[in-house]
Image (tube, rainbow, N blue to C red):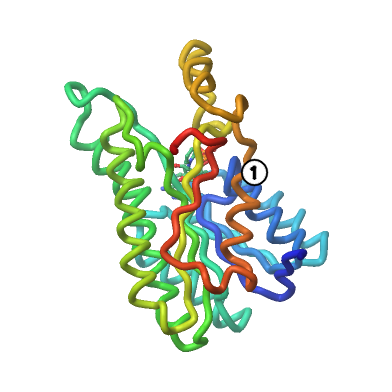
Amino acid sequence: MSMKFTDKNVLVTGGTRGIGKAIVEQFAAAGANVAFTYRSSSDEANALVKQLESNGRKAKAFQADAADYAAAEAAVGEIVSEWGSIDIIVNNAGITRDNLMLRMSEDDFDAVVGTNLKSVFNYSKAAYRPMMRQRKGRIVNLSSVVGVMGNAGQTNYAASKAGIIGFSKSLAKELGARGVTVNVVAPGYVETDMTSTLSDAAREAMLGSVPAGRPASPDDIASAVLFLASDEASYITGHVLHVDGGLAM
Ligand code: NAD
């Protein structure tokens, strides 16, 4: 089986680096037209659009704060009007603002929940009508092992990532009969900018409890996203796919 996305129109939030960039590149390599959002890195976004176009794909970059609903509607609306449909949404944008509860500010909580969880509402809502009309669609949301197991210093992040799981299962039930699936990928420890600030000791401690004995690469996560977004996965919905080297079992 080789998954094909020829002429499928995909939107990935937070596409200029890390896991989001790997997802963008894998979809494009499999034949999709790929749009992505980014918050501030315009140079990286423009370079990625050029890279995708030079490989013969349609590509679009939207500068949009993932927490902004109007921006989500505008991006999805432009894709539908210019490319004809929205087939796949990947909610990948995410941030951390770690602190023990004692020192966590209200702003740390609101920023993380707004970026990580409300964004999933925003892009799912924006795609809801077009996907219902098409009677076909895929929504894949990035949670985390932390949303399943919890982690000291990450109450805000864990709440946002656990929230994504409940949200996705509920939406999967709403959309099940419409040919639209909603699934979750829950990565473990992935080497990206997000985890580059961990100390060596924290990194070693984390890897010590990963049965696979190594961190994930962004491509390990992207492959799971593409599977859940594929035609082949049409009977899988409301699922949480752990891509964590065995960390949460
Ligand atoms: P990263 O920091 O390398 O990249 C995050 C991406 O999200 C960037 O492209 C950034 O521009 C974008 N982004 C952040 N805030 C945004 C906003 N307000 N609006 C639009 N875009 C925004 O992180 P990553 O490691 O690639 O993480 C991607 C996703 O995977 C996140 O949801 C993260 O929580 C999740 N995840 C990561 C790990 C890990 O170990 N790295 C583990 C589990 C889950």
Instruction: Look at the numbered disc 1 and say if its residue's Cβ is closer than 8 Å to ligand 1.
Output: no
What residue do we see at 82% from left, 59% from top?
54
> How far across and down, in percent of the image, does residue 34 sit?
65, 64
Instruction: From the viewer's side, name the closer residue of 144 and 87.
Output: 144
Compared across the picture, whether 234 is left or right of 150 comes to right
Within-10-Å neighbours for mark 1: few <14, some 14–19, many 20+: some
> How far across and down, in percent of the image, does residue 116 sit?
37, 48
Residue furthest bottom in the image:
133
Instruction: From the viewer's side, name the closer residue of 71 and 182.
Output: 182
Quadrant where the N terminus sits is bottom right
161 vs 149: above or below: below
Residue furthest right in the image:
55
Residue type at mark 1: give it. Answer: Asp
155 vs 94: above or below: above
What residue do we see at 68% from left, 68% from top?
33
Residue furthest front in the image:
249
- Residue 85 occupies which quadrant of the picture? bottom right
What residue do we see at 56% from left, 34% from top?
190
What residue do we see at 82% from left, 60% from top?
55
Compared across the picture, whether 187 is left or right of 147 comes to right
> How far across and down, in percent of the image, does residue 4 sit?
74, 69
> How far across and down, in percent of the image, does residue 115 sit?
36, 48
- Residue 106 occupies which quadrant of the picture? top left
Instruction: From the viewer's side, name the closer residue of 83 and 223.
Output: 223
Compared across the picture, whether 2 is left or right of 186 comes to right
Disc 1 on helix, strand or loop?
A: helix
Quadrant where the C terminus sits is top left
Instruction: From the viewer's side, name the closer residue of 90 and 186.
Output: 186
Q: How many marks?
A: 1
Q: What residue did someone put label 1 on?
A: 220
